[in-house]
Image (cartoon, rainbow, N blue to C red):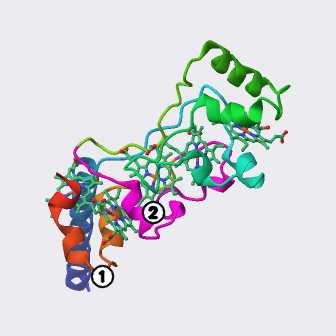
Amino acid sequence: MRVVTGLFSGRRLVVGMVALASMLLLAAYLLFFTSDTTTARTDQPIAFNHEVHAQNGIPCQYCHNGVTRSPVAGIPSVELCMGCHQHVATEKNEIVKLAGYWERQEPIPWKRVHYQPDYVYFNHQSHITAGVNCGSCHGDVARMKEAEAVVNMNMGFCLDCHAEQKNKDALYDCVVCHR
Ligand code: HEC
Ligand code: HEC
Ligand code: HEC
Ligand code: HEC
Ligand code: HEC
């Protein structure tokens, strides 16, 4: 009996060590081989609410009109906001602040939510014209009161979807994203 228990705990030790080693490896991988592409949300200069605008039927592309013709989606100008807010909800605090930027002819210093390192090339136009939805990469923004990054768009995330495309070999080439 003693020998058997001894063997048993010996094996348990080995299993335990293997489990520990793989946890350490995983931790090291997460620490050194992936970078987090999201930044913590800090307060925006104006409490812009995506949900309210979506419920009023305003399409994403009305404000982010770069998505079909350029690498960047684009953040709308104060002028575009004022196209509606010269008349809409003018008594609200946040709209009074908005009007202040307009009167001073100052751009609103919005804080970025998504972030890719400089060595990564990304282009909205090619994805939107290929029929990829905003939601695959940004989550359900139409339900967000505050825009936040809910998808960590790291390299594995990009490659997983590229692996499902017909021209996947071309889309796996390192220089596609690292030019
Ligand atoms: C009325 C204009 C307007 C509409 C409509 C709109 N957005 Fe935005 N969007 C903004 C503004 C202003 C910001 C910057 C402030 C913020 O982050 O909330 C922004 C920020 C974002 C961001 C974060 C960008 C970053 O990385 O900093 C994403 C993603 C986004 N919008 C996606 C969408 C999607 C998807 C839709 C449609 C469901 C949409 N937006 C509709 C005005 C708009
Ligand atoms: C295939 C993934 C993907 C899709 C689909 C996508 N985006 Fe993005 N988006 C990104 C990435 C990656 C960034 C960060 C780019 C950077 O930091 O250079 C970003 C940044 C943004 C930004 C802030 C910077 C900018 O480009 O102006 C906005 C706004 C935005 N996206 C809106 C949208 C909207 C609206 C749609 C749908 C019409 C959409 N995105 C579809 C991946 C995507
Ligand atoms: C196409 C018209 C349109 C545009 C463009 C537009 N808005 Fe609005 N916005 C609305 C409507 C409609 C409401 C809802 C008003 C209400 O419920 O009283 C609203 C509400 C708001 C509110 C109040 C939200 C709340 O929580 O009650 C803020 C703040 C706001 N918008 C900011 C902005 C900013 C900043 C921009 C530019 C980036 C912008 N809007 C562009 C139509 C627009
Ligand atoms: C949900 C699917 C999906 C995700 C996620 C995705 N892509 Fe793509 N990507 C595509 C499709 C579809 C194409 C277009 C293929 C074509 O036109 O042949 C493409 C093409 C590209 C291209 C080549 C076209 C060009 O614009 O030069 C680059 C670069 C690229 N993606 C970068 C990225 C990066 C970086 C990420 C992650 C931040 C990413 N993609 C995430 C589906 C995706
Ligand atoms: C579809 C786009 C895409 C392709 C293809 C791609 N990468 Fe990346 N890569 C990314 C993105 C996005 C990041 C930044 C996010 C991250 O660190 O995961 C990145 C980050 C990296 C990093 C830095 C990791 C770190 O911790 O800072 C290295 C190294 C790298 N890639 C090497 C490669 C090599 C080698 C290939 C070819 C086998 C390749 N990549 C192909 C999108 C891509």
Nearer to the camera, 24 or 43: 43
Residue 105, located in which quarter of the rendered image? top right
Crowdedness near tag 2: few (<14), some (14–19) or many (≥20) residues, C-alpha within 10 Å: some
Indicate the secondary structure of the residue bearing disc 2: helix
Q: Is residue 132 above or below residue 118?
A: below
Quadrant of the frame with the N terminus: bottom left
Q: Is mark 2 within 8 Å of ligand 2?
A: yes
Residue 143 in picture, x, y percent from top left:
68, 54
Answer with left or right where residue 164 lies relative to residue 120: right
Q: Residue sitting at 63 percent across and 36 percent down?
A: 80
Which residue in the protein does label 1 denote? 166
Which amino acid type corresponds to the residue marked 2 in the rendered image? Ile
Residue for point 25% across, 76% down? 168
Q: Is 42 on the left or on the right of 115, as rendered? A: right
Q: Magenta region: which residues?
A: 119-148
Residue 140 position in % (x across, y down): 60, 59
- Determine which of the numbered discs, if any, sits on residue 128 in the image: 2
Q: Which of 37/161 is in front?
A: 161
The answer as to whether callout 1 falls within 8 Å of ligand 4 is: yes
Residue 75's place in the image compared with 66, above or below, is above
Q: Front-most of 25 and 79?
A: 79
Question: Which numbered disc flags the more N-terminal residue, 1 or 2?
Answer: 2
The percent coordinates of residue 92 (x first, y second) are 82, 27
Disc 1/disc 2 C-alpha distance (Å): 17 Å
Q: Amino acid at mark 1?
A: Lys
Mark 1 and mark 2 in contact? Answer it, CB < 8 Å. Answer: no
